[in-house]
Image (cartoon, helix red, strand yellow):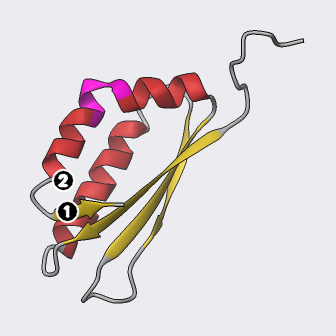
Amino acid sequence: MNTNHQTLEPVSFVISEIVQPGRIQEYEDWEKGINQAAKEFEGYLGADVIRPRDHEHPEYVVLVRFDTYQNIKKWRESSIYQTWIEKSRDFVTSTL
């Protein structure tokens, strides 16, 4: 019996962001870069991007998957992740 309360199943987190109109290509480039950086972390399983259909209200939804909660937490707490999030502040108007 696993009594340490650590999940050993794959986990995901969802990022939902509104991008400034006219800066979609910057976001697309950023999204590719952050996902490439995540690949270097243990347990990365991939990411899916749901792109907006309405470019007047460009909301992106990104689902990021890791093999365990511990590995996704290491990614989210890493300085690399924080640096990428800082880069997005120029063209993301809000995170939902």
Is 96 within the magenta? Answer: no
Image location of residue 74, percent across then percent down: 43, 23
Q: Secondary structure at mark 2?
A: helix
**Residue at image point 73% right, 10% down:** 4
**Residue type at mark 2?**
Ser
Image location of residue 20, percent across then percent down: 16, 73
- Quarter holding the C terminus is bottom left
**Residue at image point 19% right, 36% down:** 83
> Tag on residue 88?
2
Q: Main secondary structure of the magenta part?
A: helix
Estimate how packed mark 1 is, as few (under 14), some (14 to 19) or many (20 or more) residues with alpha carbons within 10 Å. many
> Tag on residue 92?
1
Image location of residue 23, percent across then percent down: 14, 73
Estimate how packed mark 2 is, as few (under 14), some (14 to 19) or many (20 or more) residues with alpha carbons within 10 Å. some
Task: Note whether 23 is above or below 3 in the view shown.
Answer: below
Image location of residue 13, percent across then percent down: 51, 46
- Quarter holding the N terminus is top right
- Place residue 52 in its image quadrant: bottom left
Give, as a single range, the part of the protein colored magenta.
Answer: 77-81
Marker count (numbered): 2
Label 2 close to label 1 by CB (< 8 Å): yes
**Residue at image point 53% right, 25% down:** 71
**Residue type at mark 1?**
Val
